[in-house]
Amino acid sequence: MMDKMINAMMKRYQMFVWLGLIIVLIAFWMAYSVGANAQTTFFSVDKAAREAAGTGTIYALANAARHSIPTWIPMLKFLGLGIMLGAITMALGSIIQTLQVLGKEVSANWSDKLNPGEPEKPKAARLFPILMMMGWIILIIGVIWAFSLNSTVTSYWNHSVANELNPAQLGSTLLTQLGTIVSTLPWLNAFRFTGMAFLFTAITLALTVIIRALQFQEKSLENFLQSKVGKPA
């Protein structure tokens, strides 16, 4: 049942290519529109004015927005790219399925003596779809975590830098929020690259399966041709 589900999913790689591209474009548009506008607004006044701006003011909100974008946009971009890499893995899986079907169709017309039979399914063929899914899961968890952290980021930066953030005392809510932000961002970065590492590994394993399938079919055809010309296999 699991193999049938995976095989059916592999054939939908084009849909996942477009899904990943749409996510990347949405992330680009958000970074360009919201992020650029926030930067422009925040730096439209002098340093003293923008750092003195209190909670809820246009400059405090712009400051929160410009710190918010780098929190979740990178994870969203990586999710889109990860989905596209997964689509590549699925396309390779579709190639593997095609090679398997063609191999069966060709060898079905051979005599029992020459028929090499169906090769044992390599472990890599079972492993690469799992690694692809694990990569996606890691990236999705990272996006959820980034969105969760974003509320803390916007809450923290929506304060006066000069009058509230800089004078924040030990144990205060603001310093606790800052600690959460600073300690979480490196983990999000690790999630991004760990998820991508799983996806690249899945692609590599899928290519390995294709190479082995081609080598097996090449050897089978070589033996068949040698038998027809009367040469020892």
Image (tube, helix red, strand yellow):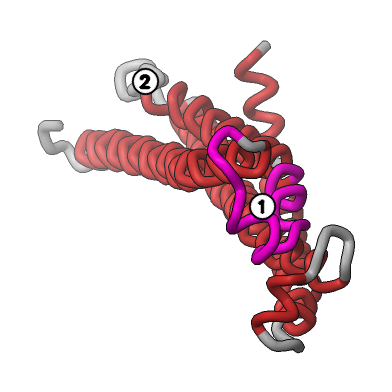
Q: Which residue is mark 1?
A: 72
Image height of 121 relative to 101, above or below: above
* Residue in front for this viewpoint, 229 or 39: 39
Within-10-Å neighbours for mark 2: few <14, some 14–19, many 20+: few
Within-10-Å neighbours for mark 1: few <14, some 14–19, many 20+: many
How far apart in space, not on screen, are marks 1 and 2 (Cα)? 36 Å
Q: Is residue 133 a member of the stretch shown in magenta?
A: no
SS type, badge 1: helix
| Label placed on residue 123 | 2
Residue type, numbered disc 2: Lys
Q: Residue at x 43, y 39 (%)?
A: 194
* Residue in front for this viewpoint, 204 or 171: 171
Left or right of 53: which side holds 57? right
Residue 10 can be seen in this image: no
In percent of width and height, residue 21 lies at 70, 61
Question: Hey, which quadrant is residue 111 in on the image?
Answer: top left
Magenta part of the protein: which range?
151-171
Left or right of 192: which side holds 173? right
Q: Residue at x 71, y 47 (%)?
A: 150
Image height of 47 relative to 224, above or below: below
Q: Residue at x 87, y 71 (%)?
A: 58
Q: Between tags 1 and 2, which lies in front? A: 1
Image height of 107 relative to 87, above or below: above
Residue type, numbered disc 1: Trp
SS type, badge 2: helix
Q: Quadrant of the N terminus?
A: top right
In percent of width and height, residue 43 lies at 70, 84
Left or right of 67: which side holds 212? left
In percent of width and height, residue 212 lies at 31, 36
